[in-house]
Amino acid sequence: MKITTIILAAGKGTRMRSELPKVLHPIANRPLLQHVYDMSHQLPDNAITIIYGHGAELVLSTLKNLDASWVEQRQQLGTGHAVQQASGQIGDTDTVLILYGDVPLLKLSTVQTLLANVNAQTLALLTVTLDNPYGYGRIVRDASGAVTKIVEEKDATPEEKLIQEGNTGILAVQGDKLKQWLNRLGNNNAQGEYYLTDVIEMAVADGIKVVTSQPETVDEVLGVNNRLQLSHLERVYQQEQAATLMEQGVTLLDPARFDLRGTIASLGTDIVIDINVILEGTTSIGNNVKIGANCHLINATIADNVEIFSHTVIENAVVGQGSRIGPFARLRPETEIADNVHIGNFVEIKKSTVATGSKINHLSYIGDASVGAKVNIGAGTITCNYDGVNKFRTVIEDGAFIGSDSQLVAPVTIGKNATIGAGSTITKDTPENQLTLSRIKQFTISGWQRPVKQEK
Ligand code: UD1
Ligand code: CA
């Protein structure tokens, strides 16, 4: 079965009150339209066409990498008019699947059920029973229960408005039939729009049976029209992801306070994640990893037995086995922490490697540095890597001990097992195994008195 999926994404989204086109608003950092695309992209033998219009340039430039045909609907004259724009993409024997770009949580399994209901004699329609169907097109059935038409809220009679079965807008039907019906659509209705929903009545008149199915949950077919609905679907999505992670053996201390904005590339066993953790981009986490409260990991790779304490930010960085990071640490891009390293509070590390067993426990900035194994970096150490124009590297060889409050002015190399006295400003390479310090000698002025406030 060859599928042509048409995603309607031209609408304005006025109630978002935003400069950003509605379909680009994100759920879990991914545009709404991308969610719909990613789901439908999993269908085999499927060509995707996206009907775009409002915010055309930005929608195109943001999502230009999607494997889809883009068809512009310059004026938004209704859902039927939108699908008409894609007529050229529809082959006679294709199964056409209509999706909405602002309905992000629709599940593949729901679409597969819908598609299983399509053949040359049927039209498959996804409907949903709602406590409050206000605003939805209503599914009108005859005495035998067969669908006869869809009537829009604004065109419905008081009796029809009592119908609780709503139209999700999602349907599937054979291409040649759809094209014939699209040609016959009119706009003689309350909104003066070309309604796609009018094809239902035409199908019935042509002896095509309308077969309905429903999604597992209402949330799957909810559209986003305002920011409240966006936040609702974000929470639904996050709770689903949290549930999936827990099924895979992760402990989430509170699944309602966890956000995954991206994908998990690999996941070990017995991971414990405290509250308010955000995992963004592509994350890999090994076995027995603990992540404390309020940590933000972006494209982080964390090996086995690592403990990340609260309020730590890790971005495009790798942490080796058994290391302990934080609390309040920041690992910036291109940082590689080897095994059994300790990075403590208020330590920032950028574009640096730190080899096995080293400790940087308090209040340091390490940038553009290679730190060897078993190095101890005292509190308040700073690599001065920037002269205002260029960046330079600092090399700290194995076993070195950097006394507290030292500045290492790059380019500079601290030799193997060298010791730097506290409070030094190191501007030249220092020899192995020796103590180097740059510090004025301490002296005391005897008999000195503190000034006192003068009487006026
Ligand atoms: C539509 C259905 C209604 C259904 C409801 C479900 C019709 C006539 N009505 O109503 O039965 O219950 O969806 O949410 O189909 N769009 C375009 N171009 C247009 C018009 C719309 O691309 O010219 C896109 C929108 O961006 C949106 C989708 O189509 O993604 C639905 O449009 P919307 O205006 O929200 O349809 P409703 O009037 O809510
Ligand atoms: Ca809508």
Image (cartoon, helix red, strand yellow):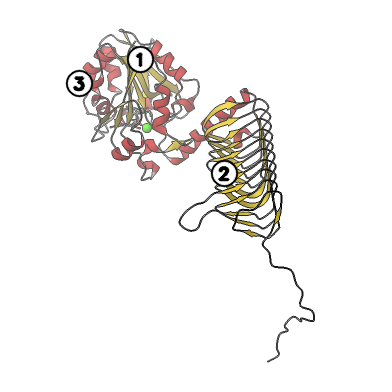
Q: Are marks 1 and 3 in contact (CB under 8 Å)?
A: no
User: Which amino acid, mark 3?
Assistant: Asn
Vertical order, 147 against 73 (above or below): above
Q: How many marks?
A: 3
Of the two numbered discs 1 and 3 on the same chain, state the one appearing first in sequence.
1
Residue nearest the viewer, comparing 233 with 144: 233
Alpha carbon of mark 1 to alpha carbon of mark 3: how far?
Answer: 26 Å
Q: Which residue has dot 1 on it?
A: 45
Q: Give left or right: position of 335 versus 202.
A: right
User: Which amino acid, mark 1?
Assistant: Asp
Q: Which residue has dot 3 on it?
A: 183
Vertical order, 77 against 445 (above or below): above
Residue nearest the viewer, comparing 308 with 323: 323
Place residue 106 in its image quadrant.
Answer: top left
Alpha carbon of mark 2 to alpha carbon of mark 1: how far?
Answer: 46 Å
Q: Position of residue 370 (x, y in %)?
A: 59, 44
Of the two numbered discs 2 and 1 on the same chain, state the one appearing first in sequence.
1
Q: Give left or right: position of 192 versus 394.
A: left
Q: Position of residue 76 (x, y in %)?
A: 26, 34
Place residue 291 in its image quadrant.
Answer: top right
Q: Which residue has dot 2 on it?
A: 352
Q: Are marks 2 and 1 in contact (CB under 8 Å)?
A: no
Alpha carbon of mark 2 to alpha carbon of mark 3: how far?
Answer: 64 Å
- In front of the other: label 1 or label 3? 1
Q: Are marks 2 and 3 in contact (CB under 8 Å)?
A: no
Q: Secondary structure at mark 2?
A: loop
User: Which amino acid, mark 2?
Assistant: Ser
Quadrant location of the N terminus?
top left
Q: Secondary structure at mark 3?
A: helix
Q: Residues within 10 Å of mark 3 (few under 14, many from 20)?
A: few
